[in-house]
Each structure stands twice: as C-alpha cells, then as structure tokens.
Amino acid sequence: MKSKYADLKENNNLDKIEEAAQFIKEGKLVLFPTETVYGIGANALDTNAVSKIFKAKGRASDNPLIVHICNTQMLERLVLEIGEIEKTLIENFWPGPLTIIFNRKSCIPNNVTAGLETVGIRMPSNKIARKLIELSNLPIAAPSANISGKPSGTKIEDIIDELDGKVDYILDAGMVDIGVESTVIRVVENKVHILRPGKITKEDIESLGIPVIIEKQIMEECKSHEKVMSPGMKYRHYAPNTKCLLVYSHDNNKLVDKINEEIELEKNVLVLGKTSNLNKYKTQNKLDMGESLEDISKNIFTLLRKVDKYKVKLVIIEGVKKEGLGLAIMNRLIRACEHNYIEVN
Ligand code: AMP
Ligand code: MG
C-alpha cells in the first residue's frame, strides 16, 4: 500500500501535521523533515512502533536511534540528569542540529537505545518537526530517512522509491536546509566528545570555553567487532555501488592535477567537483557540488544517489579541508568512498 502523502512545500498545512501527529499516537511511522535530513519517526515510548522503524530501514538492531523533542520538560521526563555543560550546550544550540547523549530513564524502550544505558536526544529547529512533536505530545524516535547503508534523504524525490509503502505518512517540505545529519556529542569528564561531526562544529563549542575532543574513529575505518562510542560509525554508509575515490589537497592546483591524473588512468570516470573547478577536468561526466561548504553539505547526498546512473568505472570526488563543517562533509565522503582516499601534500 502506498504511504499517505502531504505536500507542505508551499505552506505548513496544520491539519496535515495534526493528522500525522495522530498517526504517531497510533504507533504508525511518519516520514518528516528536519533541518538536517528527513527522518522516519515513531513514538519513542512505544517498543512496537519503534521496531517498525528498524524493519522499514533494514537497520541493524545495535544501532541506536535519536529521540526528537520539542521542549525541555520532555527532556526531563527522559533523562536521569542534565549536567552543567549539557545545560550550556542546550542554551546555545537548541533548537538545532546538535544531538546530546544522556543517561536515560527506564521509560525509554530498549530498542530505541539498542540496549545502551544512554540515549541521544535532539530538539530540531525545523518548524514542521517541532509541530509534529508538539501535537503528538510525544518524543519521536527518528533515524535518517533512507534504507540502511544508503545516503540519507534530503528531499522526498530521492527516497520515495525506496520508502513509499514502508512508512504510513510522508510530510514533504521540499529540500532540507543543512543536508548532513546532526552533530552527536557526549560529555565525559567535563569535555565534549564529538562522536559524529555535523553543522555544530568543534569551533562552535570551543567558543563557549568548553574543551572538545574529536573521536579519532570519525575518519577511520571501524571493524564491526570494535567497541565504538557511537555504534553507527561501524556500518557501511552512503556508499554508491560504483567504486569511489576521494581526493584532497590543501593546494587547489595540486588537487585538480591529481584528479586529472586519475581521469587519465581510468578514462571512464565521473567527477564530483566544486563549481569553480569543474571546467578544469578532462572528462565529460561531471557533477557540480556547489562552491561553499554549506552548498556541498546540502548537495552531497543527492549527488551520491545520482552517481550509479552514469555507469562509469570510477567516481572521483573532491575532498574539502577537515575543518568546521568540512569535517562533517569529509566524514560522510570518506565512508561513501569506503576509505579509498588520497591526500596530496
Ligand atoms: P541516524 O539516526 O541514522 O542519524 O544515526 C544516529 C546515530 O546516532 C547512530 O548511528 C549512533 O551512532 C548515534 N547514537 C544514537 N544514540 C546513541 C547513544 N546512546 N550513544 C552513542 N551514539 C548514539
Ligand atoms: Mg542514518
């Protein structure tokens, strides 16, 4: 059966969001926009509803979900304590693309947290997401909207084929704002550990005088048996079927030269590059990533979903500096390329 669909691109039809909120209350799945990527939401307090998310996505049961809330009263009902650093982060970055790991209360079902004693919580800034949570008056557990392993959904056209009929309701608000998933952090011994980089950066958090540690596993290859602070890091993610190569140099001329060298070797290639570099590449097949880090972050998942259609031997992707939002972009790209990465000095 096809999913129920509401087009909210022109205005935020409250009656449609109300109907979707009713679906959440009834234990059904609602695909909804957030400022980062689309999510597949269910009542976070209902084990059965949550298990439908894992089924719809084909998600491994040891990969926990983020719980979305719309006010701090909801937070207090879900977590054991809120530390001083967490309070500062909430004041500065909520609502927004920051997920904070807390010690959880037992009202949160085990399948939400994959059995962990902690839970990841976020207050999204997207108005439709907030309204949906508010009207259902429930915390909503929601992973990114995609079949597990595929790039996260940033617009409905990209994901409708794989998710239509697997969720009960689709709220379509057009293209999301940010395009990469939230920053995930955990406070340990008065330091913020970044478990997954996103739009809220190390620099943003440090500007509040809080020390930040970037987990080294963010850019490394994790083996499935390894213990990681953020279970999602060990899974294959974002990778197209076509082989991909990520290339980076701090020197733009060297970057373009290296990519042209690789084009020469393989010939049948597609390049994903910045707008200002595209005409420098000696191949017909090119996709425009945009120019700024904000552009690239917004476009990257849609582009990764297009590459298999080109039927090339190799996809070469321009890397960016691993700083600020660039770290989040590189974290997704390195996984899309399954760690097939060249850095030229
Ligand atoms: P997604 O829902 O696809 O954006 O993925 C959410 C990611 O957040 C997971 O893959 C985990 O890596 C991370 N996460 C969620 N809950 C926790 C938690 N309790 N502890 C550590 N990481 C978490
Ligand atoms: Mg995901």
Image (spheres, grey):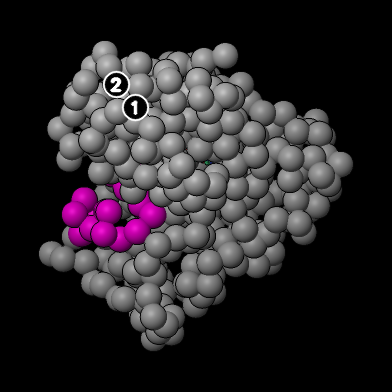
Q: Which residue is drawn at 57% across and 14% down?
A: 345
> Measured along the vertical axis of the image, is residue 13 above or below residue 306?
below
Secondary structure, mark 2, is helix
Q: Which residue is drawn at 58% across and 64% down?
A: 125
The location of residue 288, given as percent across then percent down, is 37, 45
- Give residue 119's quadrant in the image: top right
Disc 1 packing (10 Å; few <14; some 14–19; many ≥20): many
- Give residue 151's quadrant in the image: top left
- Amino acid under label 1? Ile
Q: Marks 2 and 1: in contact by CB < 8 Å?
A: yes
- Give residue 317's quadrant in the image: top left
The location of residue 92, given as percent across then percent down, is 76, 57
Name the residue beneath numbered marker 1: 316
Secondary structure, mark 1, is strand
Start-end of magenta stretch? 142-164
Name the residue beneath numbered marker 2: 263
Is 249 left or right of 37, judged from the image as shown? Answer: right
Tag 2 or tag 1, which sits nearer the N-term?
2
**Is the CB atom of the residue marked by disc 1 within 8 angstroms of ligand 2's nearest atom?**
no
Is 212 left or right of 296, judged from the image as shown? Answer: right
- Amino acid under label 2? Ile
